[in-house]
Amino acid sequence: MTAGYVTIEDDVFVGMGAMIAKSRIGNNATVGAGSVVLKDVEPSSFVTGAPAKLNMRKTQRSYIVSNP
């Protein structure tokens, strides 16, 4: 799905109230509720916050937690 400069790829979950501006959300990514996405989100990652920052990267079996 593409609207203007926003591209949302396959298997993406966008939480309620999240805002996405001029970004690409990669396959299998998750955007937390209320997040404000200003930059591209890599595939298989989980972002939250305002502005959105990487929280975790998904793997096939588990999550890899990044340092805040």
Image (tube, rainbow, N blue to C red):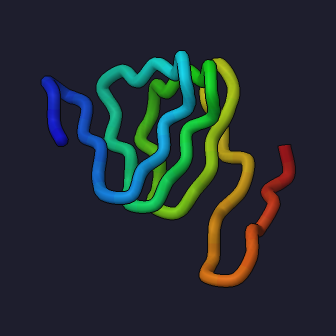
* Residue 7 spot, x, y in % from top left: 24, 40
In the depicted structure, whether residue 30 falls above or below residue 33? below
Q: Residue furthest right?
A: 67
Name the residue located 65 percent from the left edge and 19 percent from the top edge. Answer: 50
* Residue 65 spot, x, y in % from top left: 81, 60
Name the residue located 49 percent from the left edge and 53 percent from the top edge. Answer: 29
- Image quadrant holding the N terminus, namely top left
Q: Is residue 16 left or right of residue 11?
A: right
Name the residue located 79 percent from the left edge and 56 percent from the top edge. Answer: 66
In the depicted structure, whether residue 15 falls above or below residue 9? above
Q: Residue furthest front?
A: 16
The front one of 64 and 13 is: 13
Name the residue located 14 percent from the left edge and 24 percent from the top edge. Answer: 4
Residue 51 shows up from this direction: no
- Image quadrant holding the C terminus, namely top right
Q: Is residue 67 left or right of residue 42?
A: right
